[in-house]
């Protein structure tokens, strides 16, 4: 059955557009940061430092960072659930995380060609840790603030900020690297994150806990992370399906710039890749809102399955274009993939909130759901990096064909398993 537990705002019947805007502003900042770092900035910096072993080191760098995020997000979310600060449960973690997140970004901006890759990894780990230290509690702030009837609308706003943030991050970063190098890019990311934080901080009213939660031992706290699969079956299936789709995305996402350079043959892959990803995200934006409407009529499961199928088919076609390099096909397929991805993200967050085990522990449970986003970023880039590195001496085209087919496999599995979620349209 779907989760209709009351949230702290359940007495409200409707949130204004202003409320949704300010609540989702910080999600825009989150996606500007990762929309720039993952497909554009990190691959370019790693290539400057690692040279011909860029695929392997890029995959390992992201895998190590994601392992850290895997633990931090649910932990910070759970701690924020029990926070008794007069500022609210989530705000102290947002303050701590975002300020140190910006410090980590500033440190990363100091690295360039022939810099020490190990020191760069340490700075990247600071960003991973702090982004999840505030990201887990922020994920809990959404169900805290949104009544049940408003979840679909809130998910559409979050989708809008996801796409807009990705457009801004991916589109601007390549151009800024060409103009002023990495320092300019990181200054832009820090500024964007701080502005979004201020907007959410002052635009969202958070109600502190009315009474202190019951004291529990460290052992009981750790045991609270275990959710009985028999009682929370739907929640686990949402985790699994989301993880499969994320595996598909990150099998390719972090290597796409290298694909454009080494297979398609672009002279400036960072700049042209940022334009391509930004354009694809912008074109797909109206389809996200259409998916929101279709999910109200068809149900969220059908919409998720349709969007997953689009991503799987696109990945299969990409696999075959590796044998016949075409910039035109790369553009067309990127747009098609963007449409599927945008539609998927529109309903995925609402689906997750619908099946949360407990609204009182929303920070912890959304942190656990966040694992489905993070764990694949540990596994998928590492697998793809090794595959590309090993097949590179034989045939780089074959390597990318295998990677795209692996991506299509994960999308297909995630799409089929959505049928296992019961009691939710």
Image: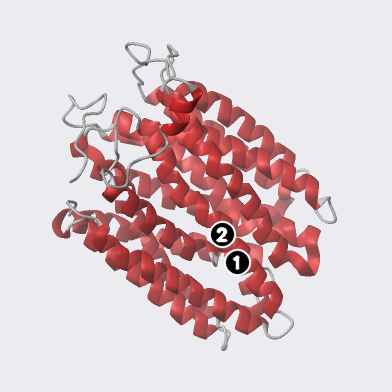
* Horizontal side of residue 338 vs 193, given as left or right: left
Q: To which residue does mark 1 refer?
A: 383
Q: Is residue 400 visible?
A: yes
Q: To which residue does mark 2 refer?
A: 379
Q: Which mark is residue 46?
A: none
Q: Is residue 158 above or below residue 18?
A: below
Estimate the spatial distance between the alpha carbons at disc 1 and disc 2, rounded to whole Å: 6 Å
**Looking at the image, which is closer to me, 343 or 380?**
380
**Looking at the image, which is closer to me, 238 or 327?**
238
Q: Quadrant of the C terminus?
A: bottom left
Q: Which class describes the residues within 10 Å of circle 2: few (<14), some (14-19), or many (20+)?
A: many
Q: Residue at x 54, y 52 (%)?
A: 35
Q: Residue 77: x percent and y percent?
A: 45, 32
Q: Residue at x 83, y 50 (%)?
A: 116
Q: Residue 64: x percent and y percent?
A: 65, 50
Residue lying furthest front in this view?
219
* Horizontal side of residue 271 vs 154, given as left or right: right
**Looking at the image, which is closer to me, 229 or 251?**
229
Q: Residue at x 35, y 36 (%)?
A: 21
How are the colours assigned in the image? secondary structure
Q: Residue 315: x percent and y percent?
A: 45, 75
Q: Give residue 127's quadrant in the image.
A: top right
The answer to whether marks 1 and 2 mark residues whose Cβ atoms lie closer than 8 Å is: yes
Q: Residue 361: x percent and y percent?
A: 35, 30
Q: Residue at x 38, y 56 (%)?
A: 240
Determine whether the residue tagged by mark 1 lies in a helix, strand or loop.
helix
Q: Which class describes the residues within 10 Å of circle 1: few (<14), some (14-19), or many (20+)?
A: some
Residue lying furthest bottom in this view?
324
Determine whether the residue tagged by mark 2 lies in a helix, strand or loop.
helix
Q: Is residue 245 above or below residue 157?
A: below
């Amino acid at each position: 059955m779907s989760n209709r537990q009351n949230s702290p705002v359940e007495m409200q019947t409707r949130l204004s557009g202003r409320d949704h805007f300010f609540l989702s502003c910080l999600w825009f900042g989150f996606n500007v940061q990762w929309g720039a770092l993952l497909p554009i900035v990190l691959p370019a910096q790693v290539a400057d430092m690692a040279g011909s072993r860029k695929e392997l080191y890029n995959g390992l760098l992201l895998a190590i960072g994601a392992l850290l995020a895997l633990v931090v997000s649910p932990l910070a979310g759970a701690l924020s659930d029990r926070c008794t600060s007069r500022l609210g449960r989530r705000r102290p973690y947002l303050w701590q995380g975002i300020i140190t997140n910006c410090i980590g970004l500033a440190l990363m901006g100091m690295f360039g060609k022939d810099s020490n890759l190990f020191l760069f990894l340490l700075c990247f780990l600071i960003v991973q840790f702090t982004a999840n230290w505030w990201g887990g509690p922020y994920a809990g702030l959404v169900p805290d603030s949104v009544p049940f009837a408003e979840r679909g609308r809130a998910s559409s706003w979050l989708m809008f900020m996801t796409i807009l943030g990705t457009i801004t991050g991916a589109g601007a970063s390549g151009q800024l690297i060409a103009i002023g190098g990495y320092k300019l890019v990181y200054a832009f990311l820090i500024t964007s994150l701080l502005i979004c934080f201020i907007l959410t901080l002052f635009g969202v009213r958070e109600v502190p806990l009315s009474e202190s939660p019951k004291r529990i031992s460290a052992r009981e706290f750790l045991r609270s992370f275990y959710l009985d699969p028999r009682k929370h079956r739907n929640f686990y299936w949402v985790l699994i399906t989301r993880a499969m789709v994320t595996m598909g995305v990150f099998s390719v996402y972090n290597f796409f710039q290298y694909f454009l350079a080494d297979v398609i043959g672009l002279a400036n892959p960072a700049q042209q890749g940022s334009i391509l990803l930004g354009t694809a995200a912008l074109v797909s934006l109206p389809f996200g809102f259409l998916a929101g409407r279709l999910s109200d009529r068809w149900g969220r499961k059908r919409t998720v399955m349709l969007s997953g199928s689009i991503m799987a088919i696109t990945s299969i076609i990409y696999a075959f274009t590796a044998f016949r390099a075409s910039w035109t096909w790369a553009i067309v397929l990127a747009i098609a993939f963007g449409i599927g991805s945008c539609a998927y993200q529109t309903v995925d967050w609402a689906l997750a909130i619908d099946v949360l085990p407990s609204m009182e522990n929303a920070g912890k449970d959304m942190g656990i759901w966040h694992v489905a986003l993070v764990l694949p970023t540990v596994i998928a880039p590492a697998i793809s990096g090794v595959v590309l590195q090993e097949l590179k001496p034989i045939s780089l085209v074959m390597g990318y064909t295998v990677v795209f087919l692996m991506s299509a496999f994960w999308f297909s599995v995630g799409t089929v398993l959505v049928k296992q979620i019961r009691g939710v349209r």
